Amino acid sequence: MVLDPGSDAYTLLAEERVDHRFKGLPPDADGLTVGELAAQRRNLFTGGFTTPVLALSAERLEHNLKLMETYTARHGLVFAPHGKTSMAPQLFRRQIEHGAWGITLAVPHQVRVARAFGVRRVFLANELVDPAALRWISGELDADPGFRFVCYVDSVRGVELMDAALAGSARPVDVVVELAGGEGARTGVRTEAECAAVADAVAGARGLRLVGVAGYEGEVPDADPERVRAWLRRLVALAADFDKAGRFAGVEEIVVSAGGSAWFDAVADVFAEIPELSLPVMKMLRSGAYVSHDDGHYRELTPFNRVPEEGALEPAFRLWTQVVSRPSAAQAFANAGKRDAAYDLDLPFAQVVRRDGAERPADGISVASLSDQHAWLRTAPEADLEVGDWLGLGLSHPCTSFDKWVLIPVAEADGTVVDYIRTFF
Amino acid sequence: MVLDPGSDAYTLLAEERVDHRFKGLPPDADGLTVGELAAQRRNLFTGGFTTPVLALSAERLEHNLKLMETYTARHGLVFAPHGKTSMAPQLFRRQIEHGAWGITLAVPHQVRVARAFGVRRVFLANELVDPAALRWISGELDADPGFRFVCYVDSVRGVELMDAALAGSARPVDVVVELAGGEGARTGVRTEAECAAVADAVAGARGLRLVGVAGYEGEVPDADPERVRAWLRRLVALAADFDKAGRFAGVEEIVVSAGGSAWFDAVADVFAEIPELSLPVMKMLRSGAYVSHDDGHYRELTPFNRVPEEGALEPAFRLWTQVVSRPSAAQAFANAGKRDAAYDLDLPFAQVVRRDGAERPADGISVASLSDQHAWLRTAPEADLEVGDWLGLGLSHPCTSFDKWVLIPVAEADGTVVDYIRTFF
């Protein structure tokens, strides 16, 4: 059981009132509950929604959830998708229903959200040395024997700070030593010798228990398939060395974890070669961006481009905006900006134009830049675009798309909105 | 009266429960109301807050509110600060208490937030052609005779779409013709001849009433004091021409509006020269970034740099993060990233380090980049920074700082948290 059956937090989401907190929703739905609005099955284009409004495709979301369920099962991977991407407990639940072991998160606030929605297994892919947050984690562990929590350590000082904060806890906090992707990479221990020193410190800390090793291959400098595989082999070798040295004595299984959304094919390959250790190995993949996928960054980087025979993710987001100004033949402006669309890796992509119920490709239209509340559109001579048209935009980077929306309509292909996804950022 | 006295929405904010929705707040405050937590006057550094946590300075906020109140009064300007910056009704209320006529906003969702909190005068500095949103606006106008609403028009087609959507409304929607900052600038009519055509269309629209002219000097191409003043004089001349042509017959006053946060000195100067027209002129300034000001973009651009004798804004934000990793002498990582800090105009600025209750300048420390949940810090040899230290960051761009936080502690200089500001993005 990885979801607490007693949690009624999901019911409370459906009972929230539609009001000013949720941009894009129909003004005439004010006062309905979210559940009542969902039951009305309004159409995204004719049901009174206002622009800008971000929509998730019901079919594509389900497709992506299923694809990674079968992918991880086929490769013998335990799946803990990174929840920081969506911060949407309803999606956490569906990920778990689709076979996920639990949810990966990055900061303690995110763990609080997951716990409020009954998630019982959390992998914190980050260091955590904040005493107030650690005391809260410790309280959760002591109160719920079914709560499993694992986090990174990468320094002796960090281990000491954790141990001091955890004085008096009944259950130790499980930790994995983070191996850095390389020199100049993000967090993580740089060398195997330092990894051993950190593991020694954990062994001496009453409040901690070493359960494995982990890292993030996405930060390997100048990443290519060869370098990423070489780093993953270092990670596996570190686990084997620690095991040989008896560092995992007393644990039930050894955690070996890696895997963002750009190299999970390499993770699957290298983790398949993990030699037999003294205990069962939990080969944990943490990819999170797959849930919505995207039309930019991850469209380019997805491992499925290298292994098309294993399937393909589908971009599930479309941001609907309205053209409010068309001051010249070469320019138009839509009413979505930095508050509504991801802009950190790529600008949005103009995909389709809707006018009078008909949809056609956004030929000759591109997004030139974003202001806070406007999209600057460049229009070629062939572009047929008028004030009042709806423009559908594809997005790049799921993490910075989800985080701009509090309640996201989930629409079927014909526009019928069947659900609303609540986020907590 | 610009705030509805019947609104109890502010009371409801204080009655909200502290829980997983609000990152950074003390985990042990779970279940208290926001008002109860505020009454505890906890200290930001010792009261159990978790990092990352964004804080507003109580003193600097008050200073900025007062400064723009006196500035606009001194220059005879009606002040409608742009509320999109903060989307915080508690700040809207304080702006209004500090003399603001009403609140400027950019999209109808933001108007819904303002209306939910009793704001009775809204200037929508954008075109609005969405029928669902217009019907909602019209309903608000018809239901509340005290609700004043003005928005932009910049095309004949836009006027026609608005008029069609407003068929059957009792009160017309007040509009101003938006004059573009120039060729290639953002929204707005490009030429005076086209402005007249748009005004003609308004005159023929039953659902609309022309009340003035407006624009945004921040988009004047290659803006400098001379070009901005030249454009402002064009705007004033347009108002005078429209007045001479009898286009404002029947209105109570003529609205002439401009003014972001980079050129309000020029707006004050040029609006002071507005000639006598046939009706009183409402000279409206819309600057919004002043409320928090910043340590980057607006620190450089603020007009007070040119008129220091009129005062100086103070940056009111500080983002507190914790160092979680120190893998090499040249690098450290803090637990705040793109989800927590503005990154669209500048990266955050390392300002101070706190360790064991002592605060000192962040010498030799700079932010090299941001991941979703990490700040990459570059550390020079002299940098004294350890895992566990709190690092205070200055931010650039108020709009993309506010929008990453749902509930923001307001702290006095000694760290005492005296209030919590709720945002609605």
Image (spheres, coloured by chain):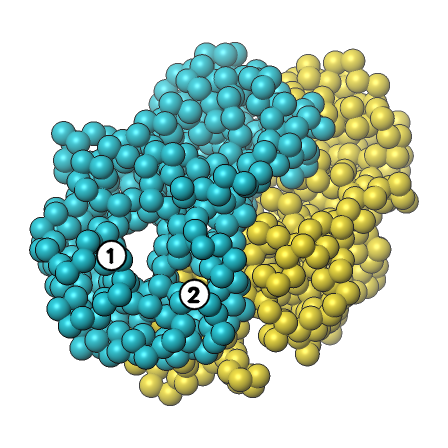
Chain colours: A cyan, B yellow
Q: Amino acid at mark 1?
A: Glu
Q: Which is nearer the N-term, disc 1 or disc 2?
A: 2
Q: To which chain does the residue with label 1 belong?
A: A
Give the SS element for disc 2: loop
Q: Is residue A380 above or below residue B320?
A: above
Report x, y in % for residue A166.
Answer: 46, 72
Residue at the disc numbered 1:
A253
Report x, y in % for residue B331.
Answer: 32, 74
Q: How many marks?
A: 2
Instruction: Answer with the quarter of the image where residue B137 lies.
Output: top right
Q: Are marks 1 and 2 on the same chain?
A: yes
Instruction: Say which residue appears at 22% left-offset and 70% top-offset.
Output: A247
Q: Is residue B269 left or right of residue B193?
A: right
Is residue B304 visible in the rendered image? The answer is no
Q: Is residue A104 left or right of residue B219?
A: left
Q: Is residue B338 left or right of residue B66?
A: left
Split into 4 quadrants, where in the image is the C terminus of chain B?
top right
Give the SS element for disc 1: loop
Q: Amino acid at mark 2?
A: Arg
- In this view of the protein, which residue sits in the foreground, A145 or A416? A145
Residue at the disc numbered 2:
A171
- Near mark 1 (Cα within 10 A), the count class, few <14, some 14-19 or many ≥20, is some
Q: Are marks 1 and 2 in contact (CB under 8 Å)?
A: no
Q: CA distance from mark 1 to mark 2?
A: 17 Å
Q: Is residue B73 left or right of residue A245?
A: right
- Near mark 2 (Cα within 10 A), the count class, few <14, some 14-19 or many ≥20, is some
Q: Is residue A349 above or below residue A232?
A: above
Split into 4 quadrants, where in the image is the N terminus of chain B?
top right
Instruction: Say which residue appears at 80% left-offset and 60% top-offset.
Output: B69
Q: Is residue A138 above or below residue B3?
A: below
- In this view of the protein, which residue sits in the foreground, B294 or A256? A256
Report x, y in % for residue A154.
Answer: 31, 71
